[in-house]
Image (cartoon, rainbow, N blue to C red):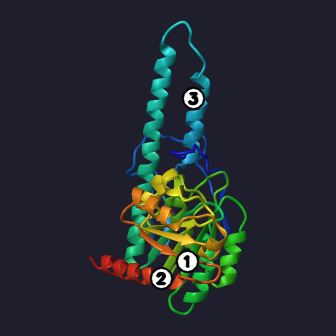
Amino acid sequence: MCASCGCQGQGTTMTNLQTGASAEIAPPPHGADHSHGVGEGDGLGHFHDGHYHVHGDAHHHAHGRDHVHEHEHEHGHAHPHDDSHHDHVHEHAHRRVEMEARILAKNDAIAAKCRAWFAGREILALNLVSSPGAGKTTLLERAISDLSGELPLFVIEGDQATSNDGERIRAAGAPVVQVNTGTGCHLDAEMIARALTELKPSVGSLVFIENVGNLVCPALFDLGEHAKAVIFSTTEGEDKPLKYPHMFSAAKLVIFNKIDLLPHLDFSMERARDNIRRVNPDAEILEVSARDGAGMSTFYQWIVAQRTVAERLSVI
């Protein structure tokens, strides 16, 4: 289960929009063992010759949620005759916390493999996160158009359903793999690892990961990216960083998008910046309009600087 919202992530599929190849990222059979920790035999995969291989039954976090829910349903009734009900509740709460810790530890282990894979190929991977409608896809379309011919760009597109955004990215000129999470509300490291086997980004390229529109769960899940970038639209409230502090504190970059709308909105850029600094004093802040291109050059300069850092890390 997702440690924040309890989403089950069922029905996750991956589609290579260049070839049309599609596959399901399925949870393990019911009854799979959830007792083991991260390590050998826990279902972790590995990269080999550019492909990601999954060992054994890589249990998906969806089944863990169902497993706990069944026990909570079975034992969640009252026991008026004694205090055993309270013991049951405490036990299940403890098991749930342990399970969430295993989920995140497993995700982090796969993310570490992705990070090493990126570093070994001098690939800069950026995880773009935002609320729905903040303009991630439009920003990517603009970046693909502006940077075409300067560096190879690849995209992993995350949405619960449809390939609408992925088709927009493909039409803009970048290879793209669409990941539909079904009932899930975020991408995880295993999804990224599998998508990379289809995407096959070239050495020295830039990989954009457009996460599912959500400012909660993507903050928890490391994807092996070099940095998280939050797209913050001027059509949202200035207090968004205070409402979602975990995401903004995890971001290396905050991009104010839709600045072309500022004359028509009751939005204080100064207050919004102050709120960002309250939760993350170290975040870099840029102002852009993906629609008309204003300020996008500063975003590209930031990318160039991050690529330089990534190249240095790859030789350490």
Q: Nearer the viewer, residue 86 or 277?
A: 277
Residue bearing the label numbered 2: 298
- Would residue 179 be found to the left or right of residue 82 on screen? right
Determine which of the numbered discs, if any, sits on residue 280 in the image: none
Q: Provide residue 253's location: percent of width, then percent of height.
A: 45, 69
Judge whether residue 110 can be spotted in this image: no
Above or below, 158 relative to 216: below
Which residue is farthest top?
A: 81
- Circle 1 Cα neighbour tier, 10 Å, few/some/many (<14 / 14–19 / ≥20): many
Quadrant containing the C terminus in the rendered view: bottom left
Q: Amino acid at mark 3?
A: His
Quadrant containing the N terminus in the rendered view: top right
Residue bearing the label numbered 1: 288
Above or below, 265 relative to 105: below
Judge whether residue 266 can be spotted in this image: yes
Which one is earlier in the sequence, the residue at label 1 or at label 2? 1
Residue bearing the label numbered 3: 71
Q: Amino acid at mark 1?
A: Val
Marks 3 and 2: which is nearer the front?
2
Q: Amino acid at mark 2?
A: Thr
